[in-house]
Each structure stands twice: as structure tokens, then as C-alpha cells.
Image (cartoon, helix red, strand yellow):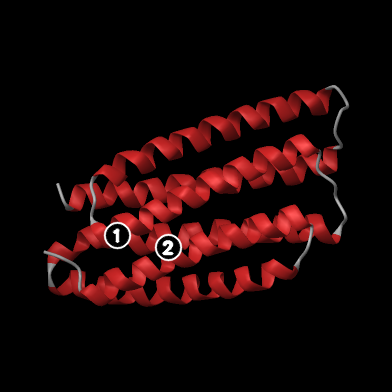
Amino acid sequence: MEAPNENVKKMLETVHAAHECIAFLQTALLQNSPTPLKACREKTAFIKKADTELTGKITRLAKEDPAYRVYLSGPQLLSRIGENIEKLDETVSRKIKDDILFSDRAVSELTILFRRLGEILKSTADLLETRNQVLIRHIGECEEDVVKKALEYATHHEERLIEGLCSPVASSYFLNMLNSIRCIAWDAKEIAAKFAEKHA
């Protein structure tokens, strides 16, 4: 049994909002400007509101018909994505406010991850809209790539920190951002995995 179209549409809108947030965060980082963060916060507010509405509606549907229980994890995963976007927002905001400088290498690495994460979220939205099963594997492969790269970047960064090539303060910001990006990618991959289960 399919979830009502209005709920699928709301989930799709939520993923689109998350995708836009990542673009705003990347712009804020590259321009070292807090201006794009305002637009991101409007999107995260939408995500939080949508997730609350979706959870309530799908929970009620699941009580009436057990077939809807497979949809219960969707809003929870979207909520976690929203929470980690907020963490990214907070970290980027504090970095800008405290005038913390990243090396060109760190900015380049984060840019790669932001773009890859944007690809994951766009593909997740496309999956919800088109039900193209090929996207499930693509999202999984992208998530694996993000995790692998994030761990590599973290290891290299910690090595540079030990060698005294970067500041402990900047290191904390950088590593927190890597962790949030990794978590968002994982949750998006889980949405795709749940979608695969529903339509197997």
C-alpha cells in the first residue's frame, strides 16, 4: 500500500529543502559570509515543521492500517537530517563570527564533500519522485564515497594538527563539520534503503 500522495509530496519537499540548505552552507563557507545562513535557517524551520506534521499523520495512518508502518522511519530520518544541517549551520556561523580561518586544503575538501552531499540529497529527492530503482545504488555508492573521504580528510587533518600545521580551534570546527556531513549522507542513504524495502 502506498502512502497518501500528500505525504510523499511533503517528504519530497523536505528533501529539496535540505538540498538547498547544503548549497547555502557551502556558499557561506566559501564567501565567509553569514548572509546565506538566513536562507538556510528558513529551510530548516520548514524541515522541522514538515517532519512534525508527517510524523503525526503517518503515525495515525499506521494505527488504522499496519501497512503504513513502513513509512514511519521516513520522517524520523528527515528529522535527523534537519538536526545535522542545524549543527552544520551553527558551526559555520561560529567559524565566521570568530573569524576562524581554514587552510585552502580544508576548504577544498569541504567543498568536495558539500557537492557530493548535494548530489546525494538531489538523488534522494529524484528517487521519491520517480521511483527509479537505479538511484538507490547510486545513493549508496555516493554515501560510501562521502564516508570514505570524510574519514581520510579527518585522518590527514589530525596528522597536520600533531605536526603543528593547523590550529586546535580550527581543527575542532573542521572535524565537527565532517561529522555532520557524514551523518546527513548516512540518513539520506537510509531513506533510499527503506524505499527499496517498501518497493521490493
Mark 1: few, some, or many residues within 10 Å (few <14, many ≥20)?
some
Please, is residue 130 above or below residue 171 in the view? Answer: below
Could you tell me residue 177's position as x and y percent? Answer: 66, 47
Which residue occupies the foreground of this view, 108 or 84?
A: 108
Q: Position of residue 80 (x, y in %)?
A: 48, 58
Marks 1 and 2, Cα distance to the nearest angstrom?
A: 9 Å
| Residue at point 21%, 62% (across, down) | 69
Q: Position of residue 39 (x, y in %)?
A: 63, 72
Q: Secondary structure at mark 2?
A: helix
Specify whether 188 is left or right of 68.
Answer: right
Whole-percent x and y of residue 55? 34, 71
Q: Residue at x 72, y 54 (%)?
A: 29
Q: Which residue is mark 2?
A: 15
Q: Nearer the viewer, residue 6 or 126?
A: 126
- Between 144 and 30, the one lying in front of the other is 30
Name the residue at 49% across, 72% down. Answer: 48
The answer to whether marks 1 and 2 mark residues whose Cβ atoms lie closer than 8 Å is: yes
Mark 1 — residue? 128
Badge 2 density bin: few <14, some 14–19, many ≥20, Cα 10 Å: many
Amino acid at the residue labelled 2? Val
Q: Which picture quadrant has residue 77? A: bottom left
- Would you say 22 lies left or right of 127 here? right
- Asked if residue 184 shows in the view, the reply is no
User: Vertical placement of 177 versus 18: above or below?
Assistant: above
Q: Is residue 26 visible?
A: yes
